[in-house]
Image (cartoon, helix red, strand yellow):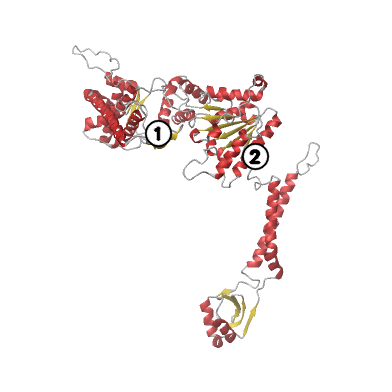
Amino acid sequence: MPTLEGGKPMPPSPNGRQNFRRFWWTLFLIMGITFLFLYRWGPAPLEGMPVRASYGEFFQWLLTNQVEHKIQSAYLVENVVHGELSDGRRFLVNIPDQDPDLIRLLREQVPNFRVEPPRTAFWLNFFFNLLGPFFLLAIFWILIYRGAQGGGRLLSFGKSRAKQVTPEEGGRVTFQDVAGVDEAKEELQEVIEFLKDPKKFQRLGGKIPKGVLLLGPPGCGKTILAKAVAGEAGVPFLSISGSDFVEMFVGVGASRVRDLFDQAKRSAKASARGAIIFIDEIDAVGRQRFAGIGGGHDEREQTLNALLVEMDGFNTQEGVVLVAATNRPDVLDPALLRPGRFDRQIVVDRPDLKGREEILKVHVRKIKLSKEVDLKSIARQTPGFSGADLANLANEAALLAARRGKNSVETQEMEAAIERVISGPERKSRVISPYEKSIIACHEAGHALVSMLVPGSDPVHKVSIIPRGTALGYTMQMPLEDRYITTRTELTARLTVLLGGRTAEELVFGDLTTGAQNDLEMATEITRRMVCEYGMSEKLGTLTYGRREGMVFLGRDIVEERNYSDQTAVLIDQEIHRIIEECRQRARSILTEHRDRLKKLSDALLEKEVLDGDEAKRIVFAEEPSKEGETPSAGAQEKVPG
């Protein structure tokens, strides 16, 4: 038995006594129900297990019983005939409800035949027929009572499922662990400072923002920003997902919203400084009302109405700040987005070059990184990467270094991790015939050569014919800096590079393959956007054609509204075909003029399988020895006029 410091026995805890009593009551209840069930429906009597005869066999016994005397006695109980055979064994047989011939034969052939009533006791009938429902109601009432006392979840169905984060738990993530989103950090830091020191802002008449909406693509740091707010705020922080409000029963979500805000108001009053609510993926509950095919969704709309009232309704109280995150702002209800509810809308977009470098520094803190690794160079090779992609990159590099038995992560592992994140793992085990391998090498050499010779294209970083992911080979181009606008020259250069692989196959082998399917899809999409969205067609003018409705941060189109005539559609198709054909002819002229360089690059790929950008440039721009036998150095990068 546990003892206190003075040697006195420690008294048993109330919870222990409650659990002990609950265990024994449950055990007695199960044993009682089992006993009654066996007594009422148990098939074996106390005399032993009888022989079960078939109906046909029993009928034959009756027909010959006057001669053989096989059946000594029998009695009928409901639809079962029990009896004793001449050898002392007991038997039973099930008979149909209506069989007058069998009853007549029993009376005639069996001298000791009788009919008996069912052997169920009166008190058991009374219990099952009258007290059984009361017994079930009593069990149901006990469950309700326990739910009201907090011991169950029966009456907490409409309660909020928000998790309150304490300062100790929230301190695990701070703003020092968040990088690349300086503007968002400043906005949220201001909200936290308002909660900590409201007089600093109230002296000029400022009011605390009621809501902050974090917008951005997946993996850019919206949720980790909320975790950092929990670690920095020092006030009660309640976290919940938007899907926790949506249930099958109408009214449950609205009840949970009201309970969530009541809980936040109580916490704000207790802390005397306010409280923060964080709703992740708010688009699950904040979708526009009566939107979509088939009308609205009653449960979600009632939940949204409750959320609107709690944020800025008749009885709104200050001190509760709502922070929400979503990557679908296009589907949110306008009433939810207006000032007074979400006063601030912060876009958490993909980081730029400086932001990617800072994010990499955060994620390599716990990784043994070699001194030769230049994180700025790695950041320059990862345009368009989100924070989650960079975290995955650092982890993949550490795993690759451990797999190779190294003591630290080097530049080679970081660059291999970039390719792994973009295209997937290498598939060196795939068996490719020499002929197909030569086609792949020619295809990738065509991409690389056109990229090096067309003005406005990004530099070649790496060329490989090793299958990776779903691709049989790839040519990786890396821009020198982050760009936010693209010129028509750059777009046509991109189209020419995309069509260079297929054109090289056609030029060298005189046939076409299916390997350029993805290139053609990308080229067609870029050209369509040039004509229909960017106004880069002289024939159609500076207009936009068609209106696309899609996911803003997810990059997927849902539907396209056609707001032009059939004649214009024909012109659009003609312009798309013209631009792609011009770029294809441009790539063909470059490859025809420099076919010897295409062969050198293709042969080098067949020999080494992987070439970096510098190796490819040396192969392409290496000059032949002069007539005097001198070997001049490689010239500058050559460009073909656009």
The residue where tag 2 is placed is: 259
Q: CA distance from mark 1 to mark 2?
A: 42 Å
For the N terminus, which image quadrant? top right
The image quadrant of residue 162 is top right
Task: Name the mark on residue 76.
Answer: none
The amino acid marked with disc number 2 is Asp
389 or 188, nearer to the observer: 188
Foreground: disc 1 or disc 2: 1
Q: Is residue 565 above or below residue 382?
A: below
Total labels: the figure holds 2
Q: Residues within 10 Å of mark 2 (few under 14, many from 20)?
A: some
Apparent side of residue 132 relative to residue 282 in the rendered image (left or right): right
Q: Position of residue 449 (x, y in %)?
A: 28, 24
The amino acid marked with disc number 1 is Arg
Residue 186 seen in render: yes
The residue where tag 1 is placed is: 547
Secondary structure of residue under mark 2: helix
The image quadrant of residue 581 is top left
Secondary structure of residue under mark 1: strand
619 or 214, nearer to the observer: 214
Q: Position of residue 88 (x, y in %)?
A: 61, 79
The residue depicted at 22 percent of the width and 30 percent of the height is 508
Q: Is residue 251 above or below residue 112?
A: above
Residue 612 seen in render: no
Q: Position of residue 527 (x, y in %)?
A: 33, 30
- Identify the mark nearer the N-term, 1 or 2: 2
Apparent side of residue 197 relative to residue 388 in the rendered image (left or right): right
Spot the residue most to the bottom.
67
